[in-house]
Image (spheres, rainbow, N blue to C red):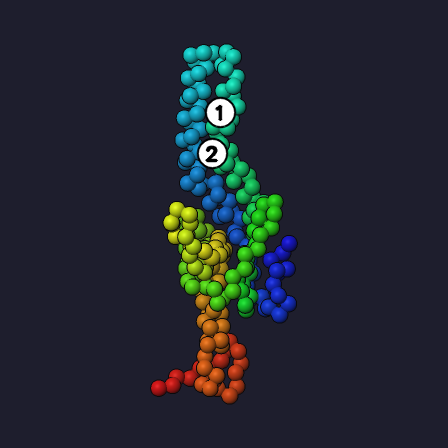
Amino acid sequence: MRVEDFKENDEIILWKGKPVKSVYLKEQIFSPLLIFAIIWLILDLGIICGIFASHGIFQGEFFLIPFFILHLAPVWMYLGKVLFAVKKCNNTEYMVTDKAIYAVTGVFTTTCDRKTFQEVTNTSVHQGLFDKQYDVGDVFITTGFRTTSKGASVRCGINIVDIEDYMKVYKLINKTGRDIFSDTNYPNDLRPKENHGYNTKYKNFD
């Protein structure tokens, strides 16, 4: 499904885009999980080699084979994350309309996250190591916070990652949100006679 399939009929698309694949894949490959997976693999290989050296080829201890297959779960998790990163990147699309912000993603299933501008409490721009190298960036949209079962505070919102025109999207979201807020909350008796929606120029009143 395309991201535009999720918008309402009267919504106007202001921007639509996808992550830059080369940057997205590099971030998935060279993630912190890579270091953890390598250390875990080295430790397990050391144990396996030690068993080979002292007992030969397991010598009846074949139960250790499924044990180590399960014990290498962090390695399989990392490899699976990298292998599915291509498909996930191809399925990821972002869209900003005059009413909301959308993020569609998924590997085997499709998930669409929609946040209206009324929900947005903060926006920020982020550039990682590969982002700076390829002149792309991330736009983080915060809509609130939730408390986990352990009492930790977790940010809620949408992350638009690894896009080329990240500053344009950042400014677009801020401007559209500000315009909607003004049109919604500005006192009617102080509006000019002609109101052209988001382009209305409000006057200063002392």
Marks 2 and 1 close (CB-CB < 8 Å): no
How packed mark 2 is, by other alpha carbons closer than 10 Å (few <14, some 14-19, many 20 or more), is: some
Tell me where residue 143 appears, x and y as whole percent.
45, 60
Tell me where residue 21 appears, x and y as whole percent.
53, 48
Instruction: Provide the residue designation for mark 2.
Output: 74
Which image quadrant for residue 55? top left
Tell me where residue 59 appears, x and y as whole percent.
50, 11
The C terminus lies in quadrant: bottom left
Q: Residue at x 55, y 66 (%)?
A: 97
Amino acid type indicated by mark 1: Phe
Location of residue 50 with respect to 83 vertically, above or below: above
Q: Secondary structure at mark 1?
A: helix
96 to the left or right of 52: right
Residue lying farthest to the left in this orientation: 206
How packed mark 1 is, by other alpha carbons closer than 10 Å (few <14, some 14-19, many 20 or more), is: some
Pick whichever of labels 2 and 1 is earlier in the sequence: 1
Measure how far apart labels 2 and 1 are at the Cα level: 11 Å
Instruction: Provide the residue designation for mark 1.
Output: 68
Amino acid type indicated by mark 2: Pro
Q: Residue at x 49, y 20 (%)?
A: 64
Location of residue 75 with respect to 112 vertically, above or below: above
Tell me where residue 3 appears, x and y as whole percent.
60, 58
Q: Residue at x 38, y 49 (%)?
A: 151
Residue lying farthest to the front in this orientation: 149
Whether residue 162 is visible: yes
Asked whether 141 or 165 is in front, the reply is 141
Asked whether 88 or 69 is in front, the reply is 69
